[in-house]
Image: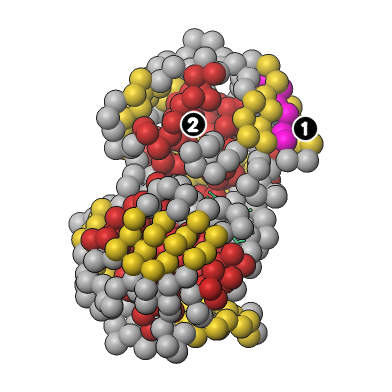
């Protein structure tokens, strides 16, 4: 099992370019199921979740050919409709194929995603909303079995709680439903608007994407298209925080600063003023520790839950006591125990972590538990005294393209190694 060995204390300087957004690429890949025409997707990140989604599409009869940064997806014969458990269990976002399969093939069998390290993460909102569009759903030996023999029909739907992939699933289903669908209490994340832009390029009739209410006029069929996914705002935010932690002047390029407003505001409160250009964020060299902050995660445009762990690592090196509240997921403090093993002073009270700083961190062996927690352990290793070994970095590879390559190009000293099968 691969690990990272990180030698701490190396200052980061220079430029790092972000890749395409994993959480935009996943729904856009699922949307290729809505057409029999070829689709070209550009800037998909080379990360494990994308490979998994390509495998799910292959199991559904589609072929994904990648060349020079472009992925060309060609539909197959089109009757396959089963997304198997062995793929879905490794990535809950596979549930995104449910809506498009129902909309175009009128049936779907998708393994119910299990929970994961950060919480139960049910998909009840997706299923209830698809039933409103006329789908007949049942659970059969761990799979969701869904049918819409007469096709889907438009409906008015209000999500009980904001759900990113729930909004995306229903947007895709409604694109081919008969008549008009109104989706209320939708997610505002940029990845939703990016999917809507791709669907519009295919001929879908959508109004209001990126706002709480989205209206869709269903069409008979959708064409192929070419679409470039937006830059990854979470990867960008991760490197911005790394630059605050260990930076001697770092510019994160190829990003959309407007998607990181909440992070930039929090850093401003901490006394870190970043320079913002059209597609870049520059973090100046640090002279004094950042100030402690009080932040609660929230749906976009609030502070992203996917940056909570990274901010917590920064809080261990900030002056004072920070309070970081995780309001989206019920169990997203797995990284706290590992940071405490490195010397951090943190108490978790319910959904709030109180972090006292600055405390020196000592390198040791730590274990990644989920995608963003593993990024946090790498960031902590960058500023820890001595050597940090991060185990189970397959979590990291799910959502960060060549993280050690990008950080080493900034001056970090990270080695990816595999100690062999039994250690
Ligand atoms: C998306 O997950 C992202 N994944 C997550 O990123 C991100 O953390 C999350 O949105 C929140 O921003 C992708 O886009 C592929 P939700 P999603 O549905 O859609 C509850 C990463 O690190 N809920 O918005 O699964 C749910 O349990 C990943 O890249 C239900 O109860 O999240 C959670 O508490 C991690 N029933 C809250 O709503 C449902 O049917 C928000 O979940 C759906 C959700």
Report which quarter residue 81 is drawn in.
Answer: bottom left
Q: Give yes or no for residue 358 being in the magenta stretch.
A: yes
Assign the N terminus to one quadrant of the image: bottom right
Disc 2 or 1, which lies upstream in sequence?
2
The number of discs equals 2
**SS under mark 1:** strand
Instruction: Measuring from the top left, give residue 358's x and y in whole percent.
Output: 65, 18
Picture residue at 54% right of the left edge, 36% below the top? 303
Picture residue at 34% right of the left edge, 71% below the top? 218
Distance Cα–Cα, label 2 vs label 1: 24 Å
Q: Which residue is mark 1?
A: 347
Please indicate whether residue 320 sits to the left or right of residue 135 in the image. Answer: right
Q: Give yes or no for residue 322 being in the magenta stretch.
A: no
Instruction: Measuring from the top left, give residue 247's x and y in whole percent.
Output: 44, 22
Report which quarter residue 205 is drawn in.
Answer: bottom left
Looking at this view, is 70 or 123 the one in front? 123
Q: Which residue is mark 2?
A: 262
Residue 172 in the image: above or below residue 309: below
Disc 1 packing (10 Å; few <14; some 14–19; many ≥20): some
Specify the segment rendered in magenta. Answer: 352-360
Report which quarter residue 59 is drawn in.
Answer: bottom left
Quarter of the displayed picture in which ligand 1 can be seen:
bottom right
Q: Nearer the viewer, mark 2 or mark 1?
A: 2
Looking at this view, is 142 or 406 the one in front? 142
Picture residue at 67% right of the left edge, 36% below the top? 325
Picture residue at 34% right of the left edge, 52% below the top? 194
Q: In this orientation, does residue 232 appear?
A: yes
Q: Which mark is residue 81?
A: none
Assign the C terminus to one quadrant of the image: bottom right
Q: In this orientation, does residue 337 appear?
A: no
């Amino acid at each position: 099992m691969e690990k990272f060995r990180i030698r701490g204390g190396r200052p980061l300087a220079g430029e790092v370019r972000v890749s395409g957004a994993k959480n935009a690429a996943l729904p856009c890949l699922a949307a290729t199921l809505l057409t029999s025409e070829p689709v070209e997707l550009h800037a998909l990140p080379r990360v494990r979740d994308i490979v998994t989604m390509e495998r799910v599409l292959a199991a559904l009869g589609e072929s994904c050919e990648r060349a020079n940064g472009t992925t060309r997806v060609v539909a197959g014969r089109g009757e396959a409709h089963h997304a198997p458990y062995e793929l879905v269990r490794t990535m809950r976002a596979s549930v995104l194929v449910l809506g498009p399969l129902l909309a175009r093939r009128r049936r779907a069998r998708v393994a119910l995603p299990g929970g994961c390290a950060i919480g139960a993460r049910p998909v009840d909102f997706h299923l209830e909303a698809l039933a409103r569009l006329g789908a007949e759903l049942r659970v059969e030996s761990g799979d969701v079995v869904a049918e819409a023999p007469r096709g889907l029909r438009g409906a008015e739907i209000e999500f009980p709680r904001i759900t990113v992939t729930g909004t995306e699933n229903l947007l895709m289903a409604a694109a081919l439903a008969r008549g008009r669908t109104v989706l209320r209490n939708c997610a505002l994340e940029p990845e939703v608007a990016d999917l809507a832009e791709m669907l519009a390029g295919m001929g879908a009739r959508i109004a209001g994407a990126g706002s709480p209410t989205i209206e869709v006029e269903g069409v008979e069929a959708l064409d192929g298209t070419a679409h470039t996914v937006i830059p990854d705002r979470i990867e960008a935010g991760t490197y911005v925080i790394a630059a605050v932690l260990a930076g001697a002047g770092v510019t994160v390029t190829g990003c959309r600063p407007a998607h990181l407003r909440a992070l930039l505001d929090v850093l401003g409160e901490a006394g870190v003023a970043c320079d913002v250009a059209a597609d870049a964020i520059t973090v100046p060299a640090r002279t004094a520790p950042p100030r402690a902050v009080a932040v609660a995660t929230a749906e976009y445009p609030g502070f992203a839950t996917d940056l909570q762990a990274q901010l917590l690592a920064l809080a261990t090196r900030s002056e004072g006591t920070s309070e970081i509240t995780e309001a989206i997921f019920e169990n997203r403090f797995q990284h706290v125990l590992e940071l405490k093993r490195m010397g951090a002073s943190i108490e978790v009270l319910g959904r709030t972590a109180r972090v006292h700083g600055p405390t020196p961190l000592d390198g040791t062996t730590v274990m990644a538990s989920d995608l963003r927690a593993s990024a946090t352990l790498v960031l902590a290793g960058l500023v820890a005294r001595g050597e940090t070994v991060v185990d189970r970095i397959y979590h990291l590879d799910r959502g960060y393209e060549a993280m050690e390559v990008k950080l080493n190009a900034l001056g970090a000293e990270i080695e990816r190694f595999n100690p062999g099968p039994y250690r």
